[in-house]
Amino acid sequence: MQFKEFDAFPKVESGFVKRTGSGGILTLVVTAVLCILVVGEINDYFTTRNDYKFLVDPLVSHELQINLDITIAMPCDALTLDLRDIADVELRLTSSDQVHKIPTHFSVGSATHHGRVRKGDINVQKLIKAASRTAALDQASKYGDTDFKACRIAGSFKANKLSGNMHITAIGHGYPGTHVDHGVMNMTHKIDELSFGELYPTIVNPLDDSFEIADNAFEAFQYFLVVVPTIYVDRSNKQLLTNQYSVSEYRRAFGEHMGYPGLFFKYDFEPMTVMISEVSSMTLGHLLVRLAGLVGGYYVTAGMVHKGVTVT
């Protein structure tokens, strides 16, 4: 026995079907609403949310890279950069070949005062893609003349993964050396980059692109940082290992011989790691089930409504 034609859903003969204007309008309305609902379901499927987990730091490391790019409104020969950790290990970074002092001009540019509120949710997938296009800190001067009034301190260096204090001070004020003339002392500064771990210029940290204006020659700016190891994981399970930090600021002015003017960055490390995972609100199977139920249920409901209107 052979089947020449098979229809599991028999149709009503066209001669028994009565087409009405109200039925056509209802069909258009049903189709439009159904398309809107289907697009909404598909949009929900592609919408992701961030899931936060806290775990003990799994990365055992004795060293950590620190990246900085800071411009100070003082000549380079009047500044010194040093770091000391709680193990009493001191790094004289001024003489290091990893950190460079570049004579330049001071300009605030697009920077804003520290403390501004950053808006917007974290897009883990875009962040990981952007971080793959890494770049080193630009250590070339943009100016050709020699009348420089400021100094750009830029570079990346390794330090012990311990609490420490990094400070930029005027030579002769707190450290041995030629006493800097008070007339050139000005701790007005702009921070373009300050981060911990591998350098990812696309990741914006709290102090990036910020500036502070000093009111007098004898003024100290103190930044207290809490560094938290962070792991970003997108939907395809790609990972980005980095660090983020929170910061609070304190500044004080004092008289001559009553303190040390400069920039002081005191940082501590949290023993916990934050894992930020990008997860979808529903699976593909869940989406298909919802679409099937939506289409079938809406057509049945629309049909019942049409019959009720026709009867009345």
Image (tube, rainbow, N blue to C red):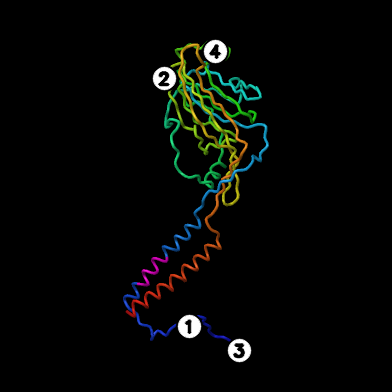
> What amino acid is labelled 2 in the image?
Asp
Q: Quadrant of residue 57?
A: top right
Q: Which residue is mark 3?
A: 1
Q: Where is residue 295 shown, x and y percent of the image?
A: 46, 69
Mark nearest the camera among 1 and 2 is: 2
Which residue is at the front of the view, 23 or 106?
A: 23
Q: Which residue is mark 1?
A: 10
Q: Which residue is mark 4?
A: 172
Q: Which mark is residue 215?
A: 2
> What amino acid is labelled 4 in the image?
Gly
Q: Cβ–Cβ below 8 Å for labels 2 and 4?
A: no
Q: Cβ–Cβ below 8 Å for labels 3 and 4?
A: no
The first of marks 1 and 3 along the sequence is 3
23 to 61, vertically: above or below:
below
> What amino acid is labelled 1 in the image?
Pro
Q: Residue at x 50, y 13 (%)?
A: 258
Between the residue at mark 1 and the residue at mark 2, the CA separation in whole angstroms equals 87 Å
Between the residue at mark 3 and the residue at mark 2, the CA separation in whole angstroms equals 100 Å
Prevailing SS of the magenta stretch:
helix
Q: Is residue 167 visible?
A: yes
Q: Is residue 148 visible?
A: no
> What amino acid is labelled 3 in the image?
Met
Query: SS for tag 4?
Result: loop
The first of marks 1 and 2 along the sequence is 1
Q: Which residues are magenta?
A: 26-34
Q: Cβ–Cβ below 8 Å for labels 4 and 1?
A: no
